[in-house]
Image: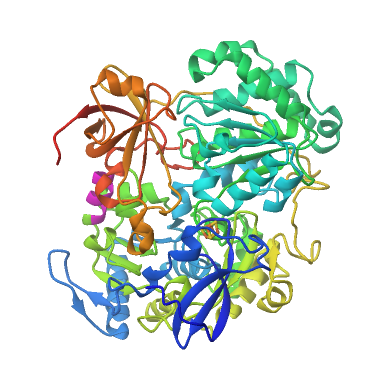
């Protein structure tokens, strides 16, 4: 796939894998992509890259790409290749017929964090303006929706507070439920650099992640907590901060809502949060927790980085708020080297949330019940908007099974593979009268589809992605779309076929519309992005050149701009180990593969990691007579699968771990229906399982 001939010209664009958002020069020979070279002037990566962005681009020209639209009357029929016009017409007629028979709320759609800001904006606009309801959601539902909720409640903005480069000013780095060197490799390397310079490290994670074995000058503490006990751990850390007198009283008095703080203080000083009293829950020695809390609280600059190990829990939102409490209590917000930093998994998770993909929020996190915000959109979009939140993804599945929800438009997400409890998802998809899938491959979800619309890769389109540090980066077209249309053009065609007129000649015009309706994007334009390279929102009249660090003077919350502490009671998950399912399974990623592997498995990266493996502690392995390489049957309350074993000291007894990059591994066959109380983000990170040796499947 990689032709090493000399390039003739290059186009600067943005990696479409993780939330670091590295800039690359796509070097071309004629119309062929020769290689991807990390851009030295990339604001997020400064010339660095990882094996995904650098080498795993061959999927864009893979033979499996869908090259023409396809339709079929029912899912037991073969696909029929048709023109774009016929496919769009077929889809629009079905959607209209279904709404005529079952009502306006009977259809909806899902936007993708893989797609550009402009594309996700258009999908939610299509749903709100042309479908006439708020049944729009994003795959961020299943990863970082608790970040959106938890940070909005406490800090007033649903986003991380820092730039990546800020970590170079941090003296103590607390990593919770994240594995940056595998999942966010370029940022993981930057973190390693800071650790080598002497910053100290605290890792709260059930597994011993690679960062802990990085040789570095500062000290490191591992808090190997049991899956599902993040809230108890974060509360215990905060309890030590408060009861041992490490609070930043000046910061709290000047920057925080003192009433909310007083309520939280009374809650957190209660002895039930003392490390000694949560030892039984978390499994971590109290003295280690006290030591970590002191280290964090006494550092000049302490920062927190977290990932899906925080959000994908029944208390994901509570942990996010607990993390914000800890940063506020120690005054670690609003300057270089500190802050609360969600590490976003996909390239445009931040952007898909910013662009109003949620059923309760218009672009810029403006609630659908806000009549003033709604009126602005109604004027530009020329329709009356629904003021009631629509269905979230899991609600769509439930409503499909009960017959109230009949059709779905899914752009760029393989929900049949990536959402939990596969059996439930597949039953819901099979119950739909019309499923429209827009994707680059015939994925697992497409097996239940009636209309297949070819998607375009990041190399075939213009637009923008917003990375985990709120940085809006340009995506530039490197090659022509394989099926003739960029994703945004397909959405425009569908809207027009439904009778709702949409007309844009370039994604820059979509961005102009976004800027006119989204206060935090008010000063963003393609011209300014060309001039500046990238922009971090908020970028408006108050911050015309963008905002590398947020909350330096005040918080966008309440009349007075004061941050709000939140009471974060620990409520154990109902997913517990017992004699039938004695081990707790948690999941994560590996460096060379990405998410469900649709792209990386179709590149040379497949050679580095071609199967998902179950890691387990030697003690658990010995008890079951298991050796590395043995085949294992893994059974949970939801289902069963088979994986090979790797016996590893990285695990703690009682906890097992796997990745989810290969469709055959069935990680989501065994995950349950549990979800975050506030956002319905699935509890992927805790599944009680039994593991036993089986013969080769
Ligand atoms: Fe792409 Fe992330 Fe790797 Fe950068 S770190 S090259 S954005 S996958």
Which residue appears at 22% of the width and 39% of the height? 642
Q: Nearer the viewer, residue 274 or 360?
A: 274
Q: Nearer the viewer, residue 505 or 65?
A: 65
Q: Is residue 10 above or below residue 14?
A: below
Q: Is residue 634 above or below residue 197?
A: above
Is residue 689 toward the left or the right of residue 320 in the image? left
Quadrant of res 79: bottom left
- Residue 260 appears at what percent x and percent y? 73, 30
Magenta span contains residue 299:
no
- Residue 51 appears at what percent x and percent y? 48, 58
Magenta span contains residue 424:
yes
Which residue appears at 69% of the width and 16% of the height? 269
Which residue appears at 77% of the width and 28% of the height? 259
**Which quarter of the rendered picture does the N terminus lie within?**
bottom left
Is residue 538 toward the left or the right of residue 182 in the image? right
Quadrant of res 435: bottom left
Q: Residue furthest bottom?
A: 30
- Residue 632 appears at what percent x and percent y? 22, 33
What is the magenta range? 421-429
Q: Is residue 288 above or below residue 85?
A: above
Q: State whether residue 568 appears in this view.
A: no
- Residue 357 appears at what percent x and percent y? 50, 59
Number of marks in picture: 0
Is residue 72 toward the left or the right of residue 409 in the image? left
Q: What type of secondary structure mainly makes up the magenta span?
A: helix
Quadrant of res 270: top right
**Which quarter of the rendered picture does the C terminus lie within?**
top left
């Amino acid at each position: 796939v990689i032709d090493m001939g000399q390039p003739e010209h290059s186009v600067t664009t943005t990696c479409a894998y993780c939330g670091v958002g590295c800039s690359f020069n796509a070097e071309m020979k004629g119309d062929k992509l020769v290689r991807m070279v990390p851009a030295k002037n990339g604001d997020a990566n400064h010339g660095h890259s990882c094996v995904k962005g650098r080498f795993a681009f061959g999927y864009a020209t893979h033979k499996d790409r869908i090259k023409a639209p396809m339709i079929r009357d029912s899912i037991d029929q073969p696909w029929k290749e048709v023109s774009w016009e016929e496919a769009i017409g077929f889809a629009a007629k079905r959607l209209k017929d279904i709404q005529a028979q079952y009502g306006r709320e009977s259809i909806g759609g899902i936007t993708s964090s893989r797609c550009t800001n402009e594309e996700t904006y258009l999908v939610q606009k299509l749903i709100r303006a042309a479908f006439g309801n708020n049944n729009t959601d994003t795959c961020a539902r299943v990863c970082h929706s608790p970040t959106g909720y938890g940070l909005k409640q406490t800090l007033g903005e649903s986003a991380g507070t820092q730039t990546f480069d800020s970590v170079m000013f941090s003296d103590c780095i607390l990593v919770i439920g994240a594995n940056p060197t595998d999942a966010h490799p370029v940022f993981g390397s930057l973190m390693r650099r800071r650790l080598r310079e002497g910053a100290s490290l605290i890792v709260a994670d059930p597994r011993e992640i690679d960062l802990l074995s990085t040789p570095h000058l500062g000290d490191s503490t591992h808090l190997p907590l049991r899956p599902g006990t993040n809230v108890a751990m974060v509360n215990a850390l905060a309890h030590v901060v408060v009861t041992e007198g490490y609070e930043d009283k000046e910061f709290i008095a000047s920057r925080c809502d003192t009433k909310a703080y007083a309520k939280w203080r009374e809650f957190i000083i209660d002895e039930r949060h003392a490390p000694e009293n949560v030892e039984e829950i978390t499994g971590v020695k109290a003295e280690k927790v006290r030591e970590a809390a002191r280290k964090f609280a006494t550092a000049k600059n302490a920062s927190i980085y977290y990932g899906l190990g925080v959000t994908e829990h029944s208390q994901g939102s509570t942990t996010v708020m607990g993390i914000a409490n800890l940063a506020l209590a120690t005054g670690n917000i609003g300057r270089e080297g500190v802050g609360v930093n969600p590490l976003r998994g996909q390239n445009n998770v931040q952007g898909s949330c910013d662009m109003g993909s949620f059923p309760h929020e218009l672009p810029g996190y403006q609630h659908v019940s806000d009549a003033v915000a709604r009126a602005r959109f109604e004027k530009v979009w020329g329709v009356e908007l629904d003021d009631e939140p629509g269905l979230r993804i899991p609600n769509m599945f439930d409503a499909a099974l009960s017959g109230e929800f009949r059709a779905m438009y899914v752009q760029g997400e393989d929900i049949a593979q990536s959402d939990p409890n596969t059996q439930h998802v597949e039953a819901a998809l099979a119950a739909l009268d019309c499923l429209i899938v827009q994707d680059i491959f015939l994925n697992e979800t497409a097996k239940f589809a009636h209309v297949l619309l070819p998607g375009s890769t990041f190399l075939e389109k213009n637009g923008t992605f917003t990375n985990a540090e709120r940085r809006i980066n340009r995506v530039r077209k490197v090659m022509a779309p394989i099926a003739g249309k960029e994703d945004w053009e397909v959405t425009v065609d569908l809207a027009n076929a439904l009778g709702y007129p949409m007309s844009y000649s370039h994604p820059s015009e979509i961005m102009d519309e976004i800027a006119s309706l989204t206060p935090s994007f008010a000063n963003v334009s393609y011209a300014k992005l060309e001039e500046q390279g990238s922009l971090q929102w908020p970028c408006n009249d108050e911050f015309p050149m963008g905002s590398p660090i947020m909350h330096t003077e005040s918080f966008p919350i309440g009349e007075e701009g004061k941050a709000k502490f939140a009471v974060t009671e620990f409520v154990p998950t109902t997913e517990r180990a017992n004699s039938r399912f004695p081990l707790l399974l948690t999941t994560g990623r590996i460096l060379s593969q990405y998410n469900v592997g649709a792209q990386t498995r179709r590149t040379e990266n497949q050679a580095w990691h071609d199967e998902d493996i179950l890691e387990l502690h030697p003690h658990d392995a010995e008890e079951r007579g298991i050796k590395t390489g043995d085949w294992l049957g893994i059974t949970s309350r939801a289902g069963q699968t088979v994986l090979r074993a790797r016996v590893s000291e990285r695990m703690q007894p009682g906890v097992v771990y796997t990745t989810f990059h290969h469709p055959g591994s069935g990680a989501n066959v065994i995950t349950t229906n549990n979800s975050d109380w506030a956002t319905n983000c699935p509890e992927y990170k805790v599944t009680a399982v039994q593991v036993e040796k089986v013969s080769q499947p």
